Image (spheres, rainbow, N blue to C red):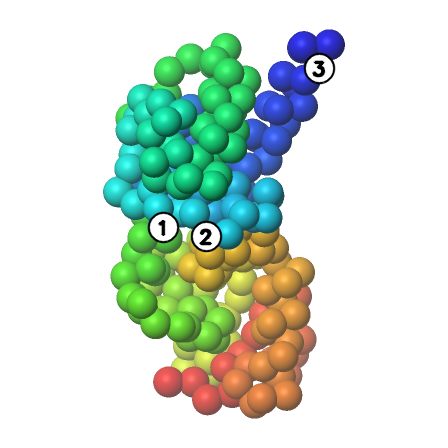
Amino acid sequence: MQTLVVGEVLKDVDTACKLLNISQDPMCWSWLQVQKWLLWTEHMYHLPRVSALFQGLSGRDLCFMSETQFRQHSAQFGDMLYAHLDIWRSAVAMKGPCTPEDSTSAVESSYADVMTTYPNQPIHLWQFLRELLLRPHNYSRCIRWLNKEKGIFKIEDSAHVARLWGMRKNRPAMNYDKLSRSIRQYYKKGIIRKPDVSRRLVYQFVNPV
C-alpha cells in the first residue's frame, strides 16, 4: 500500500517537474525554482499568494528549515507547505543526488530573461510573443520568424511557449489551448491574424514593425 502511495506522489512530482522544468530534488532548486514550486503549490491547493513570503530562499534553504520556521514565514499555511515539501522529498529520496546542471535549466534562464524585460508592469500576449521573436538566440527553437518583414511567425514548440507565458503571468496551469484562445481574440482586434496561406501554428502580426 505504501508503495502505491509513493508511486502516486512520484507521478504528481513528475508532472510538476515537467511543467515547471525543475529538478525533482528540492536541494537542487535555485531561488527562482523555489518560486515556481510555490506558485504551483498555490494553484494545486487553491492557496492565496504565499510565494512572496519566501523570497530569496533556495531549495537548500527550504530543506533545512524546520516546520516552526515555515510557520514564521506563513502563519496560516506554513505547516501545510512544510508537509507538502516533506512528502515530495520522501517520495524522491530513492533517486540519486542532482547534478549542478539541474539547478539552472534552460527554461529557467529563458524565464528570468523574459521577466526582466517588462519588470513590474503588465504585458500583453502579443508583446510577449514579439519579445521572444526578437531574441532568436534564446527562443528560435520554440518560436521563429518565417517572414519578419511581413510579420509572419511560427510557434515551433507550443508547450514551451505556453509554459513561458504561464510563468510570466504566474499561471502554472497555462497550456497551449488557453494560449491559442488568447491569440485568436486578437483576430477581432486587428493585432494578429492567420496568413493568406493558412498553416498550423503560423500567425501574422497585422502591423509588423
On the rendered image, what quadrant is the N terminus found in? top right
Q: Position of residue 159 (x, y in %)?
A: 57, 52
Q: Nearer the viewer, mark 3 or mark 2?
A: 2
- The three-letter code of the residue at mark 2 reads Arg
| Left or right placement of residue 185 versus residue 70 in this view | right
Mark 3 vs mark 1, foreground winner is 1
Residue located beneath label 1 in the image: 52
Looking at the picture, how far across and down is residue 157, in whole percent?
Answer: 54, 54
Mark seen at residue 4: 3
**Local crowd size for mark 3, using a 10 Å CA cut-off: few (<14), some (14–19), many (≥20):** few
Asked whether the beta carbons under mark 2 and mark 1 sit within 8 Å of each other, the answer is yes
Tell me whether the residue at label 3 lies in contact with that at label 1, contact meaning CB atoms closer than 8 angstroms. no
Task: Say which amino acid is labelled 3.
Answer: Leu
Query: Can you identify the residue that label 2 sits on?
Result: 49
- Could you tell me how far apart the alpha carbons at marks 3 and 2 are, in whole angstroms? 32 Å
Q: Residue at x 30, y 56 (%)?
A: 113
In the rendered view, does 77 fall on the left or right side of 114? Answer: right
Is residue 169 left or right of 120 when viewed as pictured?
Answer: right
- Closer to the chain start, of discs 3 and 2, is 3
Q: Secondary structure at mark 2?
A: loop
How far apart are labels 3 and 1 at the CA level? 34 Å
Q: In the image shown, does 28 or 41 lie closer to the viewer?
A: 41
Q: Is residue 67 above or below residue 154?
A: above
